[in-house]
Amino acid sequence: MARRGITVEEVVNMMFDDEVPILDFSSESESDSDDDLIPQLVEEVLVPIPQDEVPPVNELGWQFANSDHRPCDFVFEASGSGVQPELPSTVTEYDCFKLFISDELVGHVVEETNTFAEELKQRSEAGKMERWVGTTVAEFFTFIATVLIMAVVRKKSLKEYWTTNCMYQTPFFKTLFSQDRFLLIMRALHFINNTTMNRLDPLAKIRPILSSLTLKFREVFVPFKNLCIDESLLLWKGRLAFRQYIPSKRHRFGIKFFILCDVLTGYVQDLVIYTGSTTDIVNIDGLGVSGSVVVNMLKPYLEKGHALFTDNWYSSPTLFLYLMKHRTGACGTVRAKRKGMPEFRKKMKKDEVEMKCAGPLLAVKWHDKRDVHVLSTISSASMADSGKVDFNTGEHKMKPSCVLDYNKNMGAVDRFDMRNSFVECTRKTMKWYKKIFFHLVDCAIHNAYIVHQQVTGQVIRPQAFRENLVRQLLEHHHTPRNAPTGGRPSLDTPLRLKARHFPSEVPQTAAQGNSTRRHCRVCLHSSRRPRQRKLTRFFCAPCDTALCAVPCFEEFHTLKNY
């Protein structure tokens, strides 16, 4: 007996059946990935959906679309969207940052870092860890500020920030930390107790920070109508079980994030780290891995009238019908051979378009430079002016409305990646969880920037926001350290044999007063006569070098090898 296609009325009735629960968490799935997701790490217990929750897409009655096609028009209440905490219009960058990186979170990191440092001290190869002194919340905020400055002042290695080479030294870092202290904190940086963590969780090393920040992201900001989901790749070329290879991304190798963004502001609403079969999502029967990712991330925002934009890895008729049943529209590029997609003409000329619909669901094939397939429940079956003019004919270029909607709203995640690439504080490290931590700090700063912009109405450059944040972090938490004594002598300035130099008296110190003296550099390092430790009250100010008035001052500025 032949199957009949379902009618438009039956599709609409199926979409708005209120008796169907929201989520399905069956243990079996038809996955569109090599790994079937196993919900081992999700703490929430959710009620499974019946097997008929996902409509039978093979029975959709696709018809050629015309002007009578009516997309979904869900009502969205925008009055509750935006920043949720009541903040004054004079809020500072520091206040916005503390909404995410709180004293409690930093206190947890400080406690675990001190615990791990004590473990390192017990090891036979402890080395400089023997000199470890417990860190504090104030010192760790200063540590974060130092890392943020390093994102702007780029150098090849951490030790170069404390170099004494006068050609590219940066004295400001010495006023914040000594080199050894900064490297010790970086080495001991830890986020969970090794003896109590869940070893079945591949993200256990970073789990407390990840859970805290994703919760804060959702609490601080309620998104506007349009949302988008896309992938982001954090560069990582070391050994890691869940490292991914995505040739279309700039880094190609790394840790894959699924990111949910608010389209209007670019705010990062939620993120999930892909770890293969143990990814923090619950598999939904009939939607596969990609559809399960979408529904899990959209769970707090279903039934509210949002519109979602995705690329062809996520889009499918099954997923879009599922979202329609929960008052959520969707639009995105789609793979031509997705289950439930209609058949289109094989060969089409440039700018030719074919549209088919099944109720509010619209499928479009449009030939631009190549075939483009788009699926939508919120776009009309019409062509619209793209705002561009054909160079050869002088006519306005027309595109399908769904393509224009997709181009306008899809790209918030890519803009987030681009913006972070200029000032990201992630650095090359031997531990993957430390790199994820600094990436999460970048995400928190990005969201703090959006919050500050929404509350104050000021539009400043992201780098200027970071500079203001660093300044305020140091004002609140940094205690000036004493001037360093000893250490390697600074290298000669290239200008010591050029320009004009005159002797000056060494500035007095509070301890020595009028008797302030410094060791003469020529007497101490001479290669022409026996070396001696000789104090002098004169120095060259441009070279910042103590010298005897006669004959060392003349030799230092006239001889290459003094």
Image: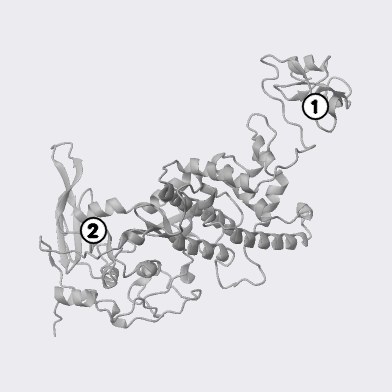
Indicate the colouring scheme: one colour
**70 vs 475: above or below:** below
Residue 373 circle label? 2
Residue at 60% from the left image edge and 50% from the top image edge:
144
Q: Position of residue 255 (x, y in %)?
A: 49, 58
User: Does the rendering let one see residue 521?
Assistant: yes
Provide residue 75's location: percent of width, then percent of height: 25, 65
Alpha carbon separation for disc pair 1 and 2: 77 Å
Task: Between label 1 and label 2, give the one nearer the viewer.
Answer: 1
Where is residue 452? Give x, y as percent: 45, 49
Query: What amino acid type is highlighted by mark number 1?
Result: Gln
Local SS, label 1: loop
**Quadrant where the C terminus lies?**
top right
Residue under numbered circle 1 = 508
Q: Residue furthest left?
A: 67
Specify whether 181 is left or right of 103. Answer: right
Please tell me the numbered disc located at residue 271. none
Q: Residues within 10 Å of mark 1 (few under 14, many from 20)?
A: few
Q: Tell me the amino acid under the disc marked 2.
A: His
Other-residue count near label 2 (Cα within 10 Å), few / some / many at <14 / 14–19 / ≥20: many
In primary-sequence order, the first of circles 1 and 2 is 2
